[in-house]
Amino acid sequence: PLPQEEIVGDTSLGLKLTILQGKVIIQAIDSLNDGRASPAQLCGLISPGDILIAVNGKSLINGTIHNPAPMDRIISVLQPLSQPMDETSGEYSREVRLRLVLGEGM
């Protein structure tokens, strides 16, 4: 098991997302609530305006970014980012794979 300090606290990725015309766009990248750098900041590869096209291998598009997935699929793909994997402990996944198209959402 992980040390308690690794479990408790802000588990956010630091991403603020907006859905515009069926595209999931990175609106902002924020620090964690306690002031530490977020995972999104630490990776250094994500920028506002990038379009999120997949989460953990689940697509948010139908072939191209110009053919977005239906809203119910978008919601089901994004849901794991905001819900714990284990409802009892409240722990979130420690690994999230994001696929993006850089700068296309501006």
Image (cartoon, rainbow, N blue to C red):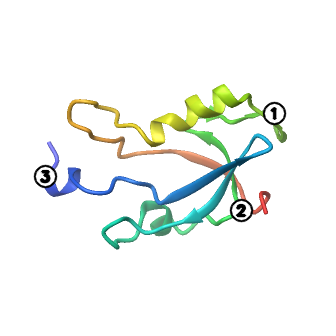
The disc, 1 or 2, on the residue closer to the chain's N-terminal end is: 2
Residue 75 spot, x, y in % from top left = 59, 33
Q: Amino acid at mark 3?
A: Gln
- Nearer the camera: disc 1 or disc 2: 2
Q: Answer with the quarter of the image where residue 102 lies.
A: bottom right
| Residue that mark 2 sits on | 49
Residue 45 spot, x, y in % from top left = 59, 65
Gap between marks 1 and 3, in whole Å? 42 Å
The disc, 1 or 3, on the residue closer to the chain's N-terminal end is: 3
| Residue that mark 1 sits on | 63
Of residues 31 and 96, the one nearer the viewer is 31
**Quarter of the picture holding the N terminus:** top left
Element class at badge 2: loop
Q: Residues within 10 Å of mark 3 (few under 14, many from 20)?
A: few
Q: Residues within 10 Å of mark 1 (few under 14, many from 20)?
A: few
Q: Residue at x 79, y 58 (%)?
A: 104
Q: Amino acid at mark 1?
A: Gly
Q: Residue at x 28, y 31 (%)?
A: 86
Residue 31 spot, x, y in % from top left = 43, 69
Q: Answer with the quarter of the image where residue 91 lies.
A: top left
- Nearer the camera: disc 1 or disc 3: 3
Residue 41 bears which disc, if any? none
| Residue that mark 3 sits on | 4
Gap between marks 1 and 2, in whole Å? 20 Å
Q: Amino acid at mark 2?
A: Gly
The residue furthest right is 66
Q: Residue at x 25, y 56 (%)?
A: 9
Residue 64 spot, x, y in % from top left = 83, 39
